Image (cartoon, grey):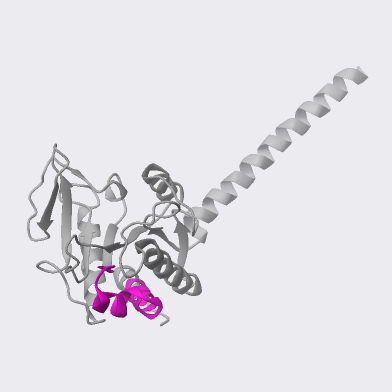
Amino acid sequence: MEINKNKLYRRRRRRLGFFLLLCVLAAIALYYVYGRGIVIVIDPGHGGDDVGAQGIVSEVDVNETTARYLEEYLRKDPNYAVVLTRDYGEGASLSARNRKASWGLGDLFLSIHANSSDDGDGSGFECYCSTPGRENYGMSLAFAHFVVDEIAKTGVSIRGEDGVRYLYYDPSGERIIKESSDETVYEYATLTVLAGKEIPAVLVEQCFVGNEADIDLLGDEDGCQLAAKAYYRAICAYFGTEPIL
């Protein structure tokens, strides 16, 4: 009889432990969903051995410096929380970045890049958003326009009709760029980091790494800080919060 009581006690203890574990996991899930504010997923483009485009500056340096400033501003604002798709100084595959965005229960995704051109004459800012026909297209386009509106205040030239573009790859892998006025639904692949998301998703090309004027404006330390402020204020404008700077 005593043995049966001990077995019963151990069984109840295991059940209690399992129940407490479920409670902890539920509390963590609720915290992630409701307790962290609006979750912004920041994707510093490239990283690790992949340094991106090279010019007067390295693209990955522009991306990471800008991301650090944007993360700082968002963490100071109680309305927001931040998820990074990779650690600074390290690399991550595109699939890993997308998983991080999904597991982070993000509310908005911003991928930060810098541009380059073969002849070195390219200049200006542009951004790409999720393409027409996708579930998050309208949200992405709206956020992209807020980004362009804020970044234009820095004085950088805006590329294209209004700075917002779509990028596709045809079956041969050739890049096809469309302006935001073209809402045709094309059955082509698009940028991997923007595909398959339900949240607003935008990729920015902040400046040209081989253009001295671009670097002076948005590619050096002060320029990256200026761009980060513009992205932060665009995020606030999209979600209707009051910026703290």
Would you identify the image quadrant in which residue 155 lies? bottom left
Would you identify the image quadrant in which residue 62 lies? bottom left
Q: Report whether residue 53 is seen.
A: yes
65 inside magenta stretch: no
Seen at 20% across and 68% down, the residue is: 145
Q: State the count of labels.
A: 0
Seen at 15% across and 51% down, the residue is: 132
- Quadrant where the C terminus sits is bottom left
Provide the major secondary structure of the magenta segment: helix
Judge left or right: residue 10 versus residue 23.
right
Q: Nearer the viewer, residue 84 or 33?
A: 84
Would you identify the image quadrant in which residue 125 lies? bottom left
Judge left or right: residue 159 versus residue 78.
left
Q: Position of residue 93 (x, y in %)?
A: 40, 45
Seen at 29% across and 79% down, the residue is: 217
As drawn, 225 above or below 160: below
- Quadrant where the N terminus sits is top right
Residue placed farthest to the top in the image? 1
As drawn, 8 above or below 36: above
Which stretch is magenta? 207-233
Q: Nearer the viewer, residue 182 or 20?
A: 182
Q: Nearer the viewer, residue 124 or 10?
A: 124
Q: Report whether residue 150 is seen.
A: no
Residue placed farthest to the right in the image? 2
Seen at 20% across and 60% down, the residue is: 141
Q: Position of residue 241 (x, y in %)?
A: 37, 74
225 inside magenta stretch: yes
Q: Position of residue 164 (x, y in %)?
A: 17, 64
